[in-house]
């Protein structure tokens, strides 16, 4: 009976676990290259300025006076890229949807988190434009008394052509997830099987289903093992 209770409690805890994951998307043409924002020098810039021929782009929506998950996104992405062999092949753009952010808040955020010099930062100064731009990725944010409610997500684009190839969810993405994201971004520049492959990977319901089964099945095995062991012990005792 104790084993059953332990198993039940374990299942109840699963939804409370912090989950970070990478989800590929079917290659999508979204309009990002000509989108403008204010850069760290306080002048108008475009996303095209951080798109390279041989580097994937990871776009991170955030806001710079955030005191909750945005700092975690920055710290963990930095940590993951330090452990990734593809770190030099990825451009990063932290883009604030908070029109109140400024050169000063960007500078403070960069210095406080010791962000790499090659990471770009910017602010979308028109909130309506920010909502429309991020809606392309099914991303939304809401102003609250303490800041903003928003998802923890980053979006990955292919080199040069800036095709949206996948998304990173959560605040603790691993180096292997970053590498997978970059490799899929490279595939998007090719034709044929790569597009079909990415379309299959992009079905998030499959990824979530595999994740659930991958978590529950080992628990069932442990439960079965202890029950079987207990029964064998009882049989041995009766003999």
Image (cartoon, rainbow, N blue to C red):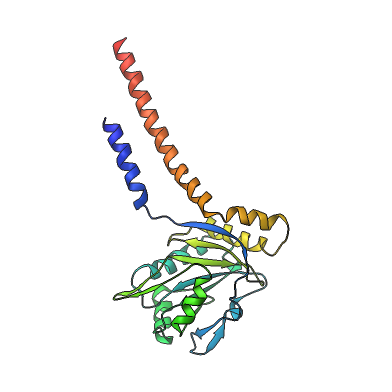
Residue 118: percent from left, percent from top:
54, 76
Q: Which residue is found at the position 52% from the left and 54% from the top?
A: 204
Horizontal side of residue 92 vs 3, given as left or right: right
Where residue 54 appears, as percent x and y from the top left, is 66, 70
Number of marks in the rendered image? 0
> Which residue shows up at 58% across the image and 76% down it?
32
Work out whether 164 lies above or below 221.
below
Q: Quadrant of the C terminus?
A: top left
Residue 122 visible in image: no
Please tell me whether residue 103 is drawn above or below residue 78 in the rendered image.
below
Residue placed most toward the observer, 102 or 165 = 165
Q: Position of residue 210 (x, y in %)?
A: 50, 46
Q: Residue furthest top?
A: 239
Pick the quarter of the image with the N terminus.
top left
Please name whichever residue, 113 or 122, is drawn nearer the observer in this view of the structure. Answer: 122
Q: Nearer the viewer, residue 140 or 103?
A: 140
Which residue is most to the right? Answer: 192
Q: Is residue 112 left or right of residue 197?
A: left
Determine which quarter of the picture holds residue 181: bottom right
Q: Residue furthest left?
A: 2
Which percent across, then down, holds residue 109?
Answer: 40, 77
Position of 59 compared to 225: left or right? right
Residue 126 shows in the view:
yes
Q: Quadrant of residue 104?
A: bottom left
Q: Is residue 184 left or right of residue 100?
A: right
């Amino acid at each position: 009976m104790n084993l059953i209770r332990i198993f039940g409690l374990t299942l109840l805890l699963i939804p409370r676990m912090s989950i970070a994951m990478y989800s590929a998307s079917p290659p999508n043409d979204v309009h990002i290259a000509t989108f403008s924002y204010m850069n760290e020098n306080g002048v108008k810039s475009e996303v095209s300025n951080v798109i390279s021929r041989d580097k994937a782009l990871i776009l991170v929506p955030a806001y710079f006076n955030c005191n909750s998950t945005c700092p975690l996104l920055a710290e963990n992405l930095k940590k993951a890229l330090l452990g990734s062999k593809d770190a030099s092949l990825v451009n990063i753009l932290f883009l604030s949807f908070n029109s109140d952010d400024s050169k000063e808040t960007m500078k403070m955020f960069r210095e406080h988190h010791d962000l790499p010099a090659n990471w770009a930062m910017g602010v979308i100064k028109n909130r309506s434009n920010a909502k429309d731009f991020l809606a392309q990725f099914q991303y939304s944010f809401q102003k609250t008394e303490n800041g903003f409610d928003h998802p923890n997500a980053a979006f990955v684009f292919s080199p040069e052509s800036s095709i949206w190839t996948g998304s990173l969810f959560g605040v603790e993405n691993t180096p292997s997830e970053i590498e997978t994201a970059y490799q899929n971004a490279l595939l998007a520049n090719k034709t044929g099987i790569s597009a079909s492959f990415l379309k299959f990977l992009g079905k998030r319901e499959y990824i979530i289903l595999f994740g659930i089964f991958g978590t529950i099945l080992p628990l069932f095995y442990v439960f079965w093992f202890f029950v079987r062991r207990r029964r064998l012990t009882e049989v041995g005792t009766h003999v």
